[in-house]
Image (cartoon, coloured by chain):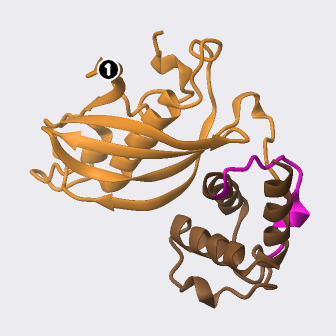
Chain colours: A orange, B brown
Amino acid sequence: MGISLKNLPHRYPFLMVDKIVEEDGAMIGIKNVTVNEWWFASKTEGDYAMPNIMILETMAQVAGLLTFVDEAEATSEKAVLLVEVRKFEFKHKVFAGDTIKVSTSTLWCREQTASVHVRALVEGNVVAEGQLIIKNNAGGKNNESGN
Amino acid sequence: MNQETRTRIKNMIVERLNLDMEPSDIVDDEPLFGEGLGLDSVDALEVIVGLELEFGIKIPSGQNKRFASIATLDEFVTELMETA
């Protein structure tokens, strides 16, 4: 089952995932950070550390792509919203030239809302890790549980 | 009233929601949502999943009023366990 980046509504310059690949039997998201990223334009020359908020955005987009996936949804556009960030920690900086690999694990999914553990690695080292609450709002429907 | 059930519910809520308080600090009749403990709708889903795992029950949707407090949850969980 292929997962296309077109399943996300995000487009350049805010599409923060380069591709989804299979690694060790699991689907992961890849983001290659280059010195040409738009957020580096306003930075002091030579300071090519990726802003943490963009690392988080990358991880949220991967979670959106890899969660709520079934045969029917694999080819349809989703509108996954980031609802909340919990127990999240940035452990190391990410620099231009790094390749971020994002893996996800769904902790629970109910009422079109999911709690997802996300982990970002660069060269095998964890750079950020935590729990995201995301909501599948495909079709613009209000899926509020009310509980 | 089942004190053991209430203690298990409080422990689960504090652990899963990472609350900065002791489980024993939660008052049985205190509202869980809004004013009171201040939980929100996402917390509610976390509590539902936590209750299902903790007690091996399946919680049907549309039971908002049963989540008012620890006391009402205790009653609800006990009912579900008896009918399971």
What's under tag 1, amino acid-wise?
Answer: Gly
Number of marks drawn = 1
- Closest to the observer, A4 or A113: A113
In the image, taking residue B63 as reference, residue A21 lies left or right, namely left
Residue B69 in the image: state x and y as whole percent.
80, 76
Question: Quadrant of the rendered structure where residue B54 is?
Answer: bottom right
Q: Is residue B19 magenta?
A: no
In-image side of A73 versus A87 (left or right): right
> Which residue occupies 50% across, 82% down?
B20
Q: Is residue A75 above or below residue B7?
A: above
Could you say where residue A70 lies in the image, as x and y percent from the top left? 59, 18
From this view, report whether residue B35 is shown above or below residue B62.
Answer: below
Question: Which structural element holds mark 1?
Answer: loop
Which residue is at a point 40% across and 37% down the rendered structure image?
Answer: A104
* Residue placed under numbered mark 1 in the picture: A25
Q: Is residue B67 magenta?
A: yes
Which residue appears at 38% of the width and 34% of the height? A16
Residue at point 57%, 27% (across, down): A9
Q: Which residues are magenta?
A: B55-69
Q: How many C-alpha atoms fall within 10 Å of the one at disc 1: few (<14), some, or many (≥20)?
A: few
Host chain of mark 1: A
Q: Position of residue A109 (x, y in %)?
A: 62, 40
Q: Is residue A32 above or below residue B31?
A: above
For the C terminus of chain A, the image quarter is: bottom right
**Horizontal and vertical percent for residue B74?**
79, 71
Could one spot residue A20 in this view of the protein? Answer: yes
